[in-house]
Structures are given as structure tokens and as C-alpha cells.
Image (spheres, helix red, strand yellow):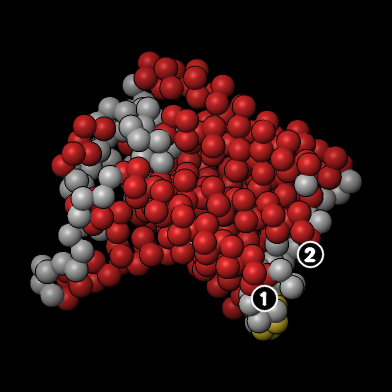
Amino acid sequence: MWVTIIAAAVAFIIAAIVGRFLIPALQNLNARQTIKTDGPTWHMSKQGTPTLGGLIFISGVLVASVLLGLPQIIQGDFSSLFVLVFSLVFGAIGFIDDWAKIKKHENTGLTAVQKFLLQLVAALLFTLLLYLTGHLSSDLYIPFFNTYVHIPWVIYLIFAAFVMVGCVNAVNITDGVDGLAAGVTLPVALFFAVVCALWGETAVGTFSGALFGGLIGFLIYNIHPAKVFMGDTGSLFLGGAVCGLAFVLDMPLILIPVGIIYIVETLSDVIQVVYFRLSHGKRIFRMAPLHHHLELCGWSENKLVIVFTGITLIFCILAFVGVIQR
């Protein structure tokens, strides 16, 4: 447990320091966010805010998890390294997308098909790696009931890839308000850190602690009014980290309660699009995803972060109850 706490502290310090130097560097590189014109009108005031800020907490997580996880890696426990590499691969996909947006001065980088294919390949390879190294079985763990359901491996592989790609993009959708994606992911990282401490999963716990500390360091610069945005570099890294932790611990269904906000945000977007098409132009929400609807209802960005983070924390506590007997 102490290693996890130290990892959180180290990641926080590194992220806080990196942010002080990275933000001016991003400004000098003109790595600025282009705001969507179909979002809330007041978001246009954010135009020109530096992006690629995900590199702030990625730096903290990378250094802390490798440095403090080195003893476990030397002993042959590569679980945290698998999750780190998986997260970095998704972060790299996000970086490519962000850089394309910066170069084109638009809010569109890679095409949807390009991102999907890259993410799908990464998810399939990660699932195979976990299966071949014994970290993942095709027996699906059911939280709260403390039981398993056997699934044929090929079907499980498809299921895992679908969940991973869906989770990563759900976190990406949640990143639409200052501090929201980082704030909501804080209790998720804490949940995995506590579970790892309970189960004696030191290596993965170190990564979870580093993720928690790195996000706090990033929020210094990302809370409203944000001095920097995480970009797809950060949101895809976070999505990879969250689903990577769930799968390396062999309990992917726990993503349902701990990722409740990610799910609701994504569903609101899907429902809006489907209803708009079926009703020939009518809308259920004033704007999708849900955080934009609530903004138009008068919620401030800070209120959104506090409420959504609080809801996630409650569901993470429920999730802990659901797996404590495992």
C-alpha cells in the first residue's frame, strides 16, 4: 500500500512540474485547441487554449509506475507494464489525432474509421497478450454475485475488444468540460488502487496510484478556467488505463458501475443522434452529450465536475462492495 501512496505522490509532483514548463512550450508551438462551432456558444472563449495537456499526467504516470514498479517487473510481474503500454498506445493514437487537428487548424483529425481500426487492433492485441500470459481467462467474473460465467474464447475476444474500444471512446466523449474527464477518473483510479491493496496486487496498484496522483497534478492546470486541455492524447490514454486495469484484474464488468458517468454520457449522445434521425429533427436533450445539456440548463462547469465526480465516487464504493468477497 505504501508503494501505491508513494507512486501517487511522485506522479503528482512530476505532473505539477511538467505542467509549469509544458504549457508555455505548447503555446510557443501554437498547439492550440480549435473549438467546435456546434457546442455551447460560450465555449468559443476557450478558443486557442493549448491542447496535448494529457502529456502532463502521462509523464507522471510513466515515471512513477516504472520507477516504483521496477522491483515487480524484475521479479517477472509485468501486469503494470502491460497496462502502461496499452494506455500509451491509445495515448499515441490520440496524439496523432491531436497533431492532425493542430496542423489543419480544425477540430477533426483522424477519420472515425481510422481511429476505430487502430483502437480495435490495439484492443485485440492487448486481450491476446493478457490471455497468453495468464492474466485473463474466458471465465467472466460477475461482481456482487461472486461467480463466473464461462464464455468461449473467440466470443470473449470479440466481447473484450468491443468493451475496450467502447470504454476508451466513452472517456473521450466525457472530456468536454474543464476538469470533467480527469475529475471523474480520479475515484476510478482510487477504486483500483484500493482493490489492488486488498488483493495484494502491488504492481497494478502502483500504476493505479500513479494514475491518481498524475491526475491531481494535471487538475491544477485543467480545472475551470482551464489553462490547458488534455486533448485526445490524454482522454484516450485515460480510457486505455481504465479498461486496461479492469481487464488485467480479470473483472471487465466492474467497468459498468465505476464507469457509470462514461456510460451515461455516451448513451445520451447515442440517444440524441438516433432520436434526431427517427423523429426527423427533434431532440431529447437540448444538446448532447449530457454535460452540454446540463450546461444549457444553467449548470456551471465546476458544478458538473463536482456532481459527476461525486456520483462516480458513490458507484465506486458500491463496486468495491461488489468485489470485496472475491
Q: Is residue 13 left or right of residue 286?
A: right
Kindly identify which residue carries mark 1. 141
The amino acid pointed to by label 1 is Tyr
Q: Within 10 angstroms of label 2, few (less than 14), some, or many (20 or more) residues?
A: few
CA distance separating discs 2 and 1: 15 Å
> Does any portion of residue 102 appear in the rendered image?
no
Kindly identify which residue carries mark 2. 134
The amino acid pointed to by label 2 is Gly
Secondary structure under the numbered disc 2 in the rendered image: loop
Q: Within 10 angstroms of label 1, few (less than 14), some, or many (20 or more) residues?
A: many
Residue 169 horizontal/vertical position (percent) = 43, 56
Q: Is residue 164 left or right of residue 66?
A: left
> Does any portion of residue 26 appear in the rendered image?
yes
Image position of 124 with respect to 62: above or below:
below
Secondary structure under the numbered disc 1 in the rendered image: strand
Q: Is residue 295 left or right of residue 237?
A: left
Question: Nearest the camera: 116 or 184?
Answer: 184
Residue shown at 55%/52% (left/top)? 187
Residue 212 horizontal/vertical position (percent) = 60, 43
Question: Nearest the camera: 142 or 101?
Answer: 142
Residue 266 horizontal/vertical position (percent) = 37, 62
Query: Of marks 2 and 1, which one's residue comes earlier in the chain?
Result: 2
Residue shown at 79%/64% (left/top)? 134
Give residue 214's quadrant in the image.
top right
Residues tagged 2 and 1 counted as in contact (Cβ below 8 A): no
Q: Is residue 155 left or right of residue 174?
A: right
